[in-house]
Image: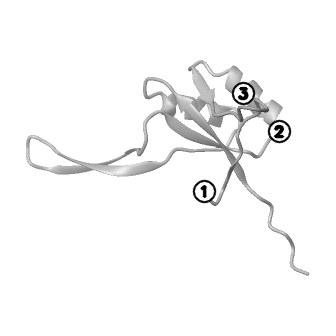
Amino acid sequence: MPAQEEKIYWYAVRTFYCKEESVAKHLKENGVEYFIPSIYKEDILPSGKKTRKLVPAIHNLLFIKKTKDEEDIKKVIESCPTMVSVIQNKSTHSYYNIPDSQ
């Protein structure tokens, strides 16, 4: 009988004023895994030289990997110096679990 794969879930977090990088720094300092959907943006400098930079694909959005208990993650989020909002289940008020496949 094959071993069952452990399901991975994520929490969607909204930031304000394009502060996803500072929130990510806070999460990293507190041992919380996260993911910022990113894309490469190409710009042309006045000199004509092209540059590529990795930027958030959707500003004000990042995902926290559920590797800790929800209460532990809530404590880290509450201690964040930047204002954030975690997407919650309307009926239970718990964080909404997003499957890794999505």
SS category of the residue bearing label 2: loop
Residue 71 in the image, given as x and y percentages of width and height: 82, 31
Rendered residue at 52%/44% (across/down): 36
Q: CA distance from mark 2 to mark 3?
A: 11 Å
Per the image, the residue denoted by label 1 is: 102
Is 79 in front, or is 94?
Answer: 94
Looking at the image, tell me whether mark 3 or mark 1 is earlier in sequence order.
3
Mark 1: amino acid? Gln
Q: How far separated are the C-alphas under marks 3 and 1?
A: 24 Å
Q: Residue at x 84, y 69 (%)?
A: 4
Earlier along the polypeptide chain: callout 1 or callout 2?
Answer: 2
What secondary structure is found at the residue carrying circle 1?
Answer: loop
Image quarter of residue 78:
top right
Residue picked out by circle 2: 69
Q: In the figure, 76 relative to 4: above or below?
A: above
User: Which mark is in front, 1 or 2?
Assistant: 1
- Name the foreground residue: 69 vs 28: 69
Q: At label 3, which amino acid type do we have?
A: Val
Badge 3 is on which residue? 76
Quadrant of residue 3 within the rendered picture: bottom right
Q: Residue 21 at x, y = what percent?
A: 49, 33
Q: Residues within 10 Å of mark 2 (few under 14, many from 20)?
A: few
48, above or below 91, in the image: below
Q: Nearer the viewer, mark 3 or mark 1?
A: 1
